Amino acid sequence: MHKTLVLILLFVFMAGASKGVSDTLQFHYGASVFAPLPNQQWWNPEVSWKNKYRDYDSGDSREAYLGSRSLFVWLTDAWHLAQTIETLGWV
């Protein structure tokens, strides 16, 4: 019983922390701890959404790799990864 409760609380904490990360990225990115990090193509939601496409800026909106717009979208940027971790925390 005790181990089960600890596991449940761990998953709830993980979901809440991931929700905080995704909300910060989406609504307060410029003032967040993520803004000065390297690899803005991964962290910055204003540009990272393009990672699921081959070369969106040049007009190539094909998938960057198989499933990058669906099954594997969680691998394309920090926001989608945080959303996936949050969802898994509640499952």
Image: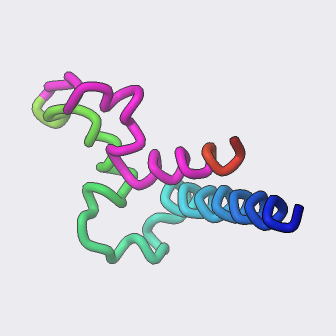
Say whether residue 68 is magenta: yes
* Quadrant in the picture for the C terminus: top right
In the picture, measured across the screen, residue 21 lies left or right of residue 63, that is right
Q: Which residues are magenta?
A: 59-86
Considering every residue shown, the one lying at the far right of the view is 1
- Residue 5 x/y as whole percent: 84, 62
- Residue 2 x/y as whole percent: 86, 67
Front position in the image: 82 or 44? 82
Task: Give the answer, above or below, for where 84 lies relative to 59.
Answer: below
Query: Residue at the spot x=78%, y=67% of the render?
Result: 6
- Residue 78 x/y as whole percent: 41, 55
- Residue 58 x/y as whole percent: 10, 32
* Quadrant in the picture for the N terminus: bottom right
Q: Quadrant of residue 23?
A: bottom right
Query: Residue at the spot x=66%, y=56% of the render?
Result: 15
Say whether residue 65 is magenta: yes
Query: Residue at the spot x=64%, y=62% of the render?
Result: 14
Front position in the image: 60 or 21? 21
In the picture, measured across the screen, residue 36 lies left or right of residue 33, that is left
Task: Give the answer, above or below, for where 4 lies relative to 54.
Answer: below
Task: Give the answer, above or below, for where 86 lies relative to 67.
Answer: below
Query: Residue at the spot x=53%, y=45% of the render?
Result: 84
- Please say which color scheme the image uses: rainbow
Considering every residue shown, the one lying at the far left of the view is 58
